């Protein structure tokens, strides 16, 4: 009888620990800036407002990415911040597979990316 009670208590403790671990893991990193940078394992880097960073499919809204363009005459490379959503399917958000997220970083409010996003929102390209 004591063995059964101890066994049941061990199972309950293990279940509680697992639930605590899962809730901590699902919290994800706390980003306190308006935008986050999310790097995927295929090398793509997106900037946006991150929601549910610890979920299986975190959500990124107000999404931007960097597009490089090469001048064929001078071979100079310029980088342009592009707002996602003008693609043919007109996406207004992205759901990311957590298994493909390499890192998440806050975008500093005084950074060049933050300034370019603000300029885009103000209509100043």
Image: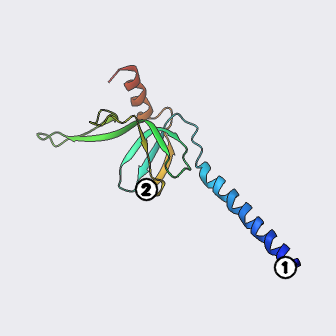
Q: Secondary structure at mark 1?
A: helix
Q: At which x and y percent is residue 50?
A: 50, 40
Foreground pick, 87 / 104 = 87
Q: At which x and y percent is residue 102?
A: 45, 55
Q: At which x and y percent is residue 95?
A: 44, 45
Foreground pick, 93 / 28 = 93
Compared across the picture, whether 78 is left or right of 111 comes to left
Q: Are marks 1 and 2 in contact (CB under 8 Å)?
A: no
Q: Is residue 30 above or below residue 22?
A: above
Q: Residues within 10 Å of mark 1 (few under 14, many from 20)?
A: few
Quadrant position of the C terminus in the picture: top left
Foreground pick, 2 / 99 = 2
Residue extending farthest to the right is 2
- Res. 12 image quadrant: bottom right
User: What residue do we see at 26% from left, 36% from top?
Assistant: 88
Q: Is residue 115 above or below residue 104?
A: above
Foreground pick, 18 / 33 = 18
Q: Secondary structure at mark 2?
A: helix
User: Marks 1 and 2, Cα distance to the nearest angstrom?
Assistant: 44 Å
Quadrant position of the N terminus in the picture: bottom right
Identify residue for label 1: 3
Q: At which x and y percent is residue 82?
A: 32, 34
Earlier in the chain: of badge 1 and badge 2, it is 1
User: What residue do we see at 42% from left, 40% from top?
Assistant: 47
User: What residue do we see at 60% from left, 51% from top?
Assistant: 26
Identify residue for label 2: 100
């Amino acid at each position: 009888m004591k063995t059964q009670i101890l066994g049941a208590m061990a199972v309950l403790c293990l279940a509680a620990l697992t639930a605590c671990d899962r809730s901590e893991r699902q919290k994800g990193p706390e980003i306190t800036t308006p935008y986050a940078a999310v790097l995927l394992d295929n090398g793509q880097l997106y900037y946006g407002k991150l929601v549910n960073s610890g979920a299986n499919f975190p959500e990124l809204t107000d999404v931007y990415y960097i597009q490089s363009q090469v001048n064929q005459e001078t071979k100079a490379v310029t980088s342009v911040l592009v707002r996602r959503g003008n693609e043919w399917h007109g996406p207004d958000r992205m759901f990311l597979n957590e298994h493909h997220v390499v890192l998440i970083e806050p975008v500093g409010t005084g950074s060049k990316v933050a300034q370019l996003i603000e300029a885009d929102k103000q209509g100043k390209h």
